[in-house]
Amino acid sequence: MEYLKLDIKKTILFLMFIKTMSFLKEIIKRRTFGIISHPDAGKTTLTEKLLLFGGAIQEAGAVKSHKIKKAATSDFMEIERQRGISVSTSVLAFNYKEKKINILDTPGHKDFAEDTFRTLTAVDSVIVVIDVAKGVEEQTEKLVEVCRMREIPVIVFINKLDREGKDAFDLLDELEQKLKFKVCPLSFPIGMGYNFQGIYNIWGNNLMLFNADNKQRISKSININNLNDPKLVDCLGELASNKLLEEVEIVKEVYPNFNKEDYLSCKQQPVFFGSALNNFGVKELLDCFITIAPSPRKKESVERIIDPSESKFSGFIFKIHANMDPKHRDRLAFIKIVSGKFKRNVAYHHVRMNKKFKFSSPNAFFAAKKEIVDESFPGDIVGVHDSGNFKIGDTFSEGEHIFFKGIPSFSPEHFRYINNLDPMKSKQLAKGIDQLMDEGVAQLFILEMNGRKVIGTVGALQFEVIQYRLEQEYGAKCSYENLNIHKACWIESLSKKNDEFNEFKKLKNKFLAKDKNGKLVFLSDSSFSLEMTKQKFPSVKFHYKSEF
Ligand code: G4P
């Protein structure tokens, strides 16, 4: 009898062990990342090529298929189709060499930068695409700054080597100076533009040659033992092979060897060269990426650090997507799973509302299509239907009171009063504004002085998006009125005594507003007046983002 009991206990322990191991295996195989770039550097093209390797899309023949671009990437919203601008962020998942890859697509247009910033809260690493001719551009600098703040490991892909561009070493310098990177080239180009011959893959120690007649294909991929291999001269000719030898020598002398720990702790950024359009250097990038990029990482909450391997589910909403189906005014909230298993039809705790929610049809995303899933793992993104309850940044758990950190709002760049054009539809307008703000389309400020509503956006285009969507989705009409605001600052009193703060509030009442969460905001009309106010009230702290 005793033996039997012991055996049952052992079997249970063994089964639990197997279950835990298979759960950990699922976590380890996931790579959730974003591709970021200045518009036109080739982010969409690279995404397509990665999907091709994963077999997630089939492309007939050549490259540059905009049909795929339209179908495969973020194209859910009507307005996006109209404008041809990637307004929304979508998720593209595929399997490659036993890894589950989740690409979180980010809008390239600068007016939607806030969307991209939020998406960066849900990725575990990023690939930065740089145009060889343009080098480091403005939008890249901003996005990399956010990656640095969030300590996100970065791999660089220098694209469009089939075109004339900047010298490879100059570009590496630029990456170090403008982006403060410590670069580590893992491939190196042989020529460029008209003279582009191929790429020496330092990471895989092989040589990929470009077909001289047809620049759409890789003509050969040659494994070489070392750079003195006679095959090098046979393939490239004496001149080019000598140049490559010299350049690789410099790379080895000047730049550090690859160190995975340094990459993961953002102290080093591996660099690849290639041409996304020609599918050149992309596979090498992907093969290295799946080897070195991190699996789902720990995430900080206000209360404690959550490890993905914890058995209890937790996750947060980083994106709300409206109008997926124009016939229904439903919204899809994207949840990044931080820990545990997310299961269909299980009631989860919505921390902010202190309420349980059960999802009967959670969606997972596979390239162009979405599917209902029964369970998802840390690193995955699930889309759940929302009838207007959720906000960006909301946390779900199995009951624990945790709030995930790190989805701050930044000061908008443009501000306008919003007016109701149809008094019969004021309720619809208020609801529309409310829900669009929950989605993070723009920020709403309500003036303390008179209760007027001010909309703040990152780009001027968003005002049109809001107007269009209020009309299409809520049947409400609005107009805007210009407002001369330089910056919005979230304010905090550093002094225990409230005298100075009260004086500040009295004197600056005209410029004070409450944001969506009721936090006090100072809307300064010029950088000069902001500076003066700071000097006059030293115990008032002015923050450029809503989390401090
Ligand atoms: P984005 O998402 O970063 O905005 O860039 P996207 O991939 O849309 O690429 C922008 C342009 O650059 C596209 O051309 C694309 O074909 C081209 N491109 C991407 N990768 C390469 C490359 O490796 N070599 C060359 N030569 N071009 C590349 P377009 O003319 O703007 O538009 P389209 O007519 O091709 O769409």
Image: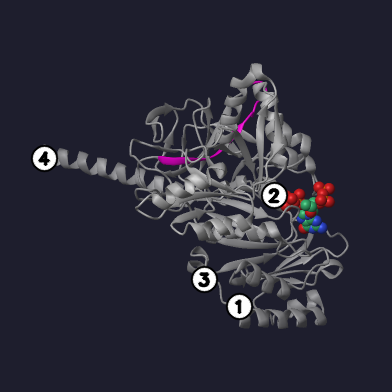
Name the amino acid, label 2: Lys
Q: Is residue 323 magenta?
A: yes
Tell me the residue that label 1 is attached to. Answer: 255
Measure the alpha-carbon separation of dots 3 and 2. Answer: 33 Å
Q: Is mark 2 within 8 Å of ligand 1?
A: no
Say whether residue 277 is visible.
no
The answer to whether the beta carbon of the residue marked 1 is less than 8 Å from any atom of ligand 1 is no
Judge whether residue 438 can be spotted in this image: yes
Q: How many marks?
A: 4
Q: Distance of mark 4 from mark 1, alpha carbons? A: 65 Å
For badge 3, the amino acid type reads Asn
| Badge 1 vs badge 3, beta-carbon distance below 8 Å | no
Kindly state the secondary structure of the residue where label 1 is placed. loop
Decide which of 190, 300 is in the foreground and name it: 300
* Residue that mark 3 sits on: 259
Q: Write down the region rendered in magenta.
A: 314-328
